[in-house]
């Protein structure tokens, strides 16, 4: 089955967690500012109405898959899915009040990965760094989009 691996990255955003979450959850607008796409399989379902076990179509800049929602709360949005059967993971986005910047948000992106390909997420493998760079790129896009909006 392979060894489990964990990855995480975070960003500080100068806006309240609810404002950051609002931009993050506005999946239809991603095409205006992001290289990622996230959308419900049920085209009539709003992202804010997604519940556990609802299915998504996700493309994280070339990594396309169809995970299921595992949480959709004010503090966390997460899914569980598989990439080509090699990686199975739970991907989480946390929206936390910043301890560094009053009124800001510390947004964390984390994933626990297992499966036959999990070894490629070990720290010495370039695929791990490529994945983290992709996540950081999304965070750069999200931060720019959130901070350009009036609070």
Image (cartoon, helix red, strand yellow):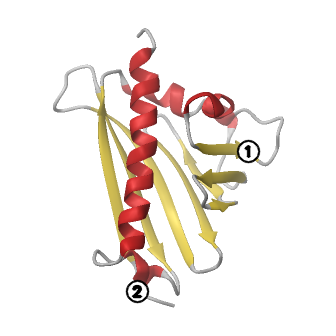
Residue at (35%, 77%) from the top-left corner? 125
Q: Secondary structure at mark 2?
A: loop
- The relative height of residue 39 versus residue 116 in the rendered view (above or below) is above
Residue at (62%, 28%) from the top-left corner? 32
Q: Label 1, on which residue?
A: 40
Q: Position of residue 141 (x, y in %)?
A: 45, 35
- Who is closer to the viewer here, 141 or 16? 141
- The relative height of residue 33 versus residue 60 in the rendered view (above or below) is above
Residue at (40%, 80%) from the top-left corner? 4
Q: Does the rendering let one see residue 18?
A: no
Q: Earlier in the sequence, mark 2 or mark 1?
A: 2
Q: Position of residue 147 (x, y in %)?
A: 38, 20
The picture quadrant where one finds residue 129 is bottom left
Q: Label 2, on which residue?
A: 3
Q: Position of residue 109 (x, y in %)?
A: 40, 50
Question: Residue pushed farthest left?
Answer: 100
Within 10 angstroms of label 2, few (less than 14), some, or many (20 or more) residues?
A: some
The picture quadrant where one finds residue 128 is bottom left
């Amino acid at each position: 089955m392979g060894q489990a691996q964990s990855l995480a990255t975070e960003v500080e955003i100068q806006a309240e967690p609810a404002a950051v979450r609002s931009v993050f959850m506005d999946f239809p607008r991603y095409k205006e500012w992001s290289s990622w796409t996230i959308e419900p399989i049920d085209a009539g379902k709003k992202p804010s109405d997604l519940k556990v076990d609802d299915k998504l179509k996700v493309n994280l800049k070339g990594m396309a898959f169809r995970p299921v929602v595992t949480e959709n709360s004010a503090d966390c949005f997460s899914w569980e899915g598989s990439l080509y059967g090699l990686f199975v993971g739970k991907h989480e986005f946390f929206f936390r009040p910043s301890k560094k910047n009053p009124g800001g948000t510390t947004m964390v992106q984390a994933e626990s990965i297992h499966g036959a390909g999990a070894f490629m997420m070990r720290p010495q493998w370039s695929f791990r760094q490529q994945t983290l760079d992709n996540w950081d790129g999304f965070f750069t896009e999200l931060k720019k989009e959130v901070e350009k909006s009036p609070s």
